[in-house]
Image: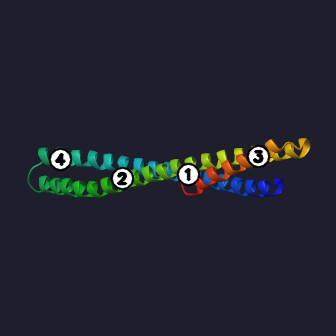
Amino acid sequence: MTAILATIGALISYQGGATQNAALLYKNEAAIKKTEASDQWSFYQAKSNKQNLAELGATLATGKAADDYRAEVERYKSEKEKIMADAKALEQASRDADAKSEESMHLHHRWAQSMALIQIAIALAAITLLTRQKWLQWLAYGAGIGSLAVGALAFAHF
């Protein structure tokens, strides 16, 4: 029984580590996307500043120079729309990666709970061998079944 529990424990431990690594990768992706979004918003702000200067130039200038400035204002407006869309998409990608990270950490906690229960089951099985107490064997079975139940919840993404 101890060998079976240890084998199950190894599988649970692997899954726990895998979900923790996934959570870290998603969190890293979220940070990268957040930084990229911040860069886009800075770019948007720079275009806004240029647009404001062009609007001022259009107000102060006359003739062809004023028309040139108005054309620049329109160009900056259209460039800003794409930049804003890109920034919002990156922010959404960051939120999505954060959500995936949270989900993976939740699963990691389930796997960790399952691992703790299997370790308890192994310890109880070892004590059962030493003491020959039948009730300890039943406790070991119960902890093992509990571990499998929590592991099944993790596997089913609950």
Q: Residue at x 61, y 54 (%)?
A: 19
> Quarter holding the N terminus?
bottom right
Q: Residue at x 63, y 52 (%)?
A: 149
Mark 1 neighbour class, 10 Å CA radius: few under 14, some 14 to 19, many 20 or more? many
User: Which amino acid lies under the numbered mark 2 shown in the image of this protein?
Assistant: Ala
Q: Does the residue at mark 1 contact the one at mark 2 (Cβ under 8 Å)?
A: no
* Of the pair 153 and 99, the residue shown nearer to us: 153
Q: Residue 101: x and y, percent?
A: 52, 50
How many angstroms separate mark 4 from mark 1 (CA)? 49 Å
- Helix, strand or loop at label 1? It is helix
- Left or right of 3 on screen, residue 64: left
How many angstroms separate mark 1 from mark 3 (CA)? 33 Å
User: Which amino acid lies under the numbered mark 3 shown in the image of this protein?
Assistant: Trp
Q: Does the residue at mark 4 contact the one at mark 1 (Cβ under 8 Å)?
A: no
Q: Which mark is residue 87?
A: 2
- Check the image and tell me how it is coloured: rainbow
Q: Which mark is residue 55?
A: 4
How many angstroms separate mark 2 from mark 3 (CA)? 58 Å
Q: Does the residue at mark 1 contact the one at mark 3 (Cβ under 8 Å)?
A: no
Q: Circle 3 is placed at which residue position?
A: 138
How many angstroms separate mark 1 from mark 2 (CA)? 26 Å
**Marks 2 and 3, the one that precedes in the sequence:** 2
